[in-house]
């Protein structure tokens, strides 16, 4: 499967990797995220486009499944990446896939960004969360808390009709929509955490008292 600059393949396809791509070898096992699902492909394509715009220094792959997105982030920026999942099988598979791709990142079993290991690794300037609409809405405050001002958030695992529902929760946390990617019935939302403006300095003239004429 090809998405953006990435080419995702299994061991049996090792001889089919074309030149000029970023190869990611994924042995899925029992975890989600082989690259063939529309939401995973959307996230990979967005990662590829983000790399054209800026560099990220601290990335979180929340709900990592096979670790595919974490591997892609390491290969793009060669910076700090953390992967986490609520499922112990996914965490184990992500570790195996990291070794198969000659990359390193911590894989943590966690139910969200409030887990101590993730909270210590925060704040993140890029968070990837390819899970489901329900968890995305529930985790909105925690995700926003560990994202730096000006940081990027990529949300997927949601259907087109769920876009506004999910978006409402994140707008309430001070994030704004940058763009939407769609493939069939599936969507990925790309958001940015708004940087707070510094407080305005007080007027040097102070408050003027209005006197009667």
Image (cartoon, grey):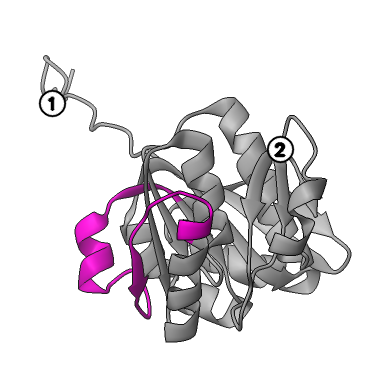
- The answer to whether residue 52 is left or right of residue 151 is right
The reply to whether callout 1 and callout 2 are in contact (CB within 8 Å) is no
User: What residue is rendered at 58% in x and 59% in y?
Assistant: 68
Q: State the image coordinates of residue 67 (x, y, percent, origin top left).
A: 52, 63
- Disc 1 is placed on an element classified as loop
Q: Which quarter shows the N terminus?
A: bottom right
Neighbor class of circle 1 (other Cα within 10 Å; few <14, some 14-19, many 20+) is few
Residue 5 is tagged as 2
Q: Which residues are magenta?
A: 98-126
Q: State the image coordinates of residue 130 (x, y, percent, origin top left).
A: 59, 66
Q: Image quarter for residue 115?
A: bottom left
Is 104 part of what is drawn in magenta? yes
Residue 161 is tagged as none
Neighbor class of circle 2 (other Cα within 10 Å; few <14, some 14-19, many 20+) is some
- The answer to whether residue 201 is left or right of residue 193 is left
Q: Image quarter for residue 163?
A: bottom right
Q: State the image coordinates of residue 173 (x, y, percent, origin top left).
A: 42, 60
- Disc 2 is placed on an element classified as loop
The residue under label 1 is 207
- The answer to whether residue 197 is left or right of residue 95 is left
């Amino acid at each position: 499967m090809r998405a953006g600059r990435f080419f995702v393949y299994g061991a049996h396809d090792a001889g089919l990797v074309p030149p000029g791509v970023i190869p990611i070898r994924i042995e899925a096992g029992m975890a989600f995220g082989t690259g063939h699902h529309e939401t995973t492909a959307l996230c990979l394509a967005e990662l590829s486009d983000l790399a054209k715009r800026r560099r990220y220094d601290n990335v979180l792959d929340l709900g990592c499944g096979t670790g595919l997105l974490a591997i892609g982030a390491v290969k793009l920026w060669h910076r700090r990446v953390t992967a986490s999942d609520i499922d112990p099988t996914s965490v184990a598979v992500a570790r195996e896939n990291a070794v198969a791709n000659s990359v390193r990142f911590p894989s943590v079993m966690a139910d969200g960004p409030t887990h101590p290991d993730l909270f210590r690794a925060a704040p993140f300037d890029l968070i990837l969360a390819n899970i489901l609409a329900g968890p995305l809405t529930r985790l909105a405050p925690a995700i926003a808390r560990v994202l730096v001002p000006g940081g990027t958030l990529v949300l997927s695992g949601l259907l087109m009709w769920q876009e506004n529902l999910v978006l409402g929760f994140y707008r309430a946390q001070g994030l704004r929509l940058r763009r939407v990617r769609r493939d069939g019935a599936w969507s990925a939302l790309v958001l940015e955490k708004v940087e707070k403006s510094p407080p305005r300095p007080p007027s040097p003239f102070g408050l003027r008292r209005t006197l009667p004429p």
